[in-house]
Every structure is written in structure tokens, then in C-alpha cells.
Amino acid sequence: MIHHLHLTRPMRVASVLAVILAASATGLAAQTSQSVLTSRAELTVAAQHAENLAAISNGAASTRNRLVAAAIRKRLATGDFQAGDRIVLSYISDIPHTDTLVVRSGQTLALPANASLSLEGVLRSELRPKVEAEVLKYIKAVEIEVTPLTRVGILGEVAHPGYFALRSDVPLADAIMTAGGPTATADVERTEIRRGKDVVHSADETRQAIATGLTIDQFGLSAGDDIVVARRRELLSGSVMPIVGALASVAAIFVAVHR
């Protein structure tokens, strides 16, 4: 089942270069972003930073930074959207309209009035002005809102695991709470991001992203990625373990959400 969520709580401003902090074993200095969706300029700076680190590092660190830079360059070239992604379009013409649009093969988005728009190379942060400009060619509309959704799995030790179509500006901590929050046996500190069978963000990287309030977009999640909350290691026994585990996991989420 795919769940649609629209959060109204103001989203926190976070460091966009923490995307690279999360992706790089060597780490980078954080830089404040004025948006919860990553801009092209920010990604370009991040890619250049990773390339610079690759040039001055050796061995595994150099390889890791080259891979990070290549992944960012690919995102800049191909954009954030793929077939099957969903976008919520709301506007007022004669009456209010809200449509859920689906990206088709070839990264094409079908718009009202039989219009279409190519999303090749378009980032989530660039979506709204492009859609708005195209809609206004065919429809006299006001109060246009464009909300990209990202379908991610929230799995493991959460109350209601499953796949959710979430706003791309939702912080990772809030994303976990949409699945009912951590269970009594969860260890949120060891949450990781998986893409298929591969771990694309380690527990350390994900913990840092949650602590700094990074959004789904800023952490570089793509449709189909899984946020996997780990089970606590059996360090305690008996009835005490579930109680302590629940308190620790809820406390970690509470701190991240209210940071």
C-alpha cells in the first residue's frame, strides 16, 4: 500500500552540504541552505568539493569522493524525476483544482489542457517554476502549488512498515514517524538507507542526517529507496530491554524533530 502524506508543520532549514557529509567517509564542512530542496548551485558546489577532496586524498578515501562527485554530477545531468514519480498540482481557476500527476516514460509530465512538460535534467527545487510557467500558457490560474512526492520504504523496526509517497521536503525524522515511529525494540541510531540490496547511506551518515534535520531531498533519496530502522542489539535481557529500547528510540526521534 502506498500512503500519501502532506505535512503542514514548517520544515527546518538544514545544511545542504551535509548531503556530502552523509555520503563521504572523509566529511565536508557544512554550509547553510535557504531551502529544504537542494538547489543546482548547492549541488554544483558539493560536487566540486568532493572532486577537490578526491584529488588530495589517497586510496579508499579518494575513490569514495570520486564516486560521490560522479553521483552528484549524474543527478545534475539527469534530474530528480523518473517514470512513476508523482507530483501534486493545486491551483485556482474558476474553482480550486488539485491533481496528482504521474511522470511518464521519457521523464514526461502530462499537465492539464493536454499540455506536457519534459522533466529531463530538472531537480525537485526547479520543478515549481517550470510547471507554473507551462500551466499559465493554457490556463488562467492563480495560487499554483507544485509538490513533488518521493516514494520511499520505511521498513524494519517501525510500527507500520510500508511504502509512502512523501513530500520531498519532509525531514528524515518525520518520515520515520509517518510509519508509526520506532518500535520498542528499535535502534534508531543504526538506521540506514538502502537502494535495493546496497547500503547507500550508513548508520553513521543517516544518524548525522537525522540529527541535523536533513530532508528526503537534501539527503539525496530517490524513489524506491528504503529507510531501514535497525533492531536493538541484545545487550539487555528480560522485560527491561523493550522498555529501555523504546525510551531510547523515542527520545532520539523527539530530539531530531524538535531540534
Image (cartoon, rainbow, N blue to C red):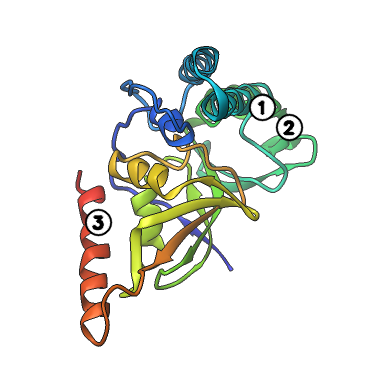
Contact, CB < 8 Å: mark 1 with mark 2?
yes
Mark 3, other Cα within 10 Å: few <14 / some 14–19 / many ≥20: some
Residue 91, percent across and down?
A: 50, 38
Residue 170 makes an appearance in the image: no
Q: Where is mark 3, residue-wise?
A: 252
Amino acid beneath label 2:
Ala
> 257 or 133: nearer the eye?
257
Residue 67, percent across and down?
A: 61, 28
Q: Measure the alpha-carbon separation of dots 3 and 2.
A: 46 Å
Q: Where is mark 2, residue-wise?
A: 115
Q: Choose the circle earlier in sequence order: 1 or 2.
A: 2
State which mark lies toward you, 3 or 1. 3
* Residue at horizontal 20 percent and vertical 69 percent from the top: 247
Q: Measure the alpha-carbon separation of dots 3 and 1.
A: 48 Å
Q: Is residue 165 above or below residue 232?
A: above
Classify mark 3: helix, strand or loop: helix
Q: Is residue 144 left or right of residue 119?
A: left
Residue 138 disc label: 1
Amino acid beneath label 1:
Tyr
Q: Residue furthest right?
A: 106
* Residue at horizontal 59 percent and vertical 68 percent from the top: 1
* Residue at horizontal 30 percent and vertical 32 percent from the top: 13
